[in-house]
Amino acid sequence: MRYSSQIKPITNLKANAAEVLEQVNEWREPLVIDQNGEARAVLQDNASFEQTQGTLVLLKILALGNQEIAAGKLKPVPDVVARLRRKRAAG
């Protein structure tokens, strides 16, 4: 996904910080901050940032699961259920 239409120079951010933040929060789209013709930072509203971070956590969990599957670290469901039932009965 490219955000080339959402680029603002750093001078605009410095001069209009409140308006830029309002725009970012209203549009819920990241804004690329440009310095000397080069993309230097991305400004994102907090709700979108938190959603992105949550998505990354889920993707990491899935990747770890795939690594365990590839390494053969699998247990049959009936064995796991039996072990959990034994633990529950003992506790």
Image (cartoon, rainbow, N blue to C red):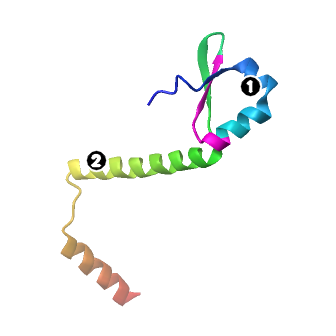
**Residue at the spot 47% in from the left edge and 27% down from the top edge:** 2
SS type, badge 2: helix
Task: Judge depth for marks 2 and 1 and give the one in front.
Answer: 1
Q: Residues within 10 Å of mark 1 (few under 14, many from 20)?
A: some
The residue tagged 1 is: 13
- Which range of residues does the magenta coloring cover? 25-34
Q: Is residue 62 above or below residue 31?
A: below
- The quarter of the picture where the N terminus appears is top left
Nearest the camera: 55 or 31? Answer: 31
The residue tagged 2 is: 67
SS type, badge 1: helix
Q: Name the residue at the bottom extreme.
A: 89
Q: Name the residue at the top extreme.
A: 36
Q: Name the residue at the right extreme.
A: 15
Q: In the shown orientation, is residue 80 left or right of residue 50?
A: left
**Residue at the spot 74% in from the left edge and 21% down from the top edge:** 12
- The quarter of the picture where the C terminus appears is bottom left
Q: In the shown orientation, is residue 72 left or right of residue 52?
A: left
Does the magenta run of residues contain 24?
Answer: no
| Amino acid found under the numbered disc labelled 2 | Gln
Does the magenta run of residues contain 30?
Answer: yes
Alpha carbon of mark 2 to alpha carbon of mark 1: how far?
Answer: 43 Å
Q: Is residue 47 above or below residue 35?
A: below
| Amino acid found under the numbered disc labelled 1 | Leu
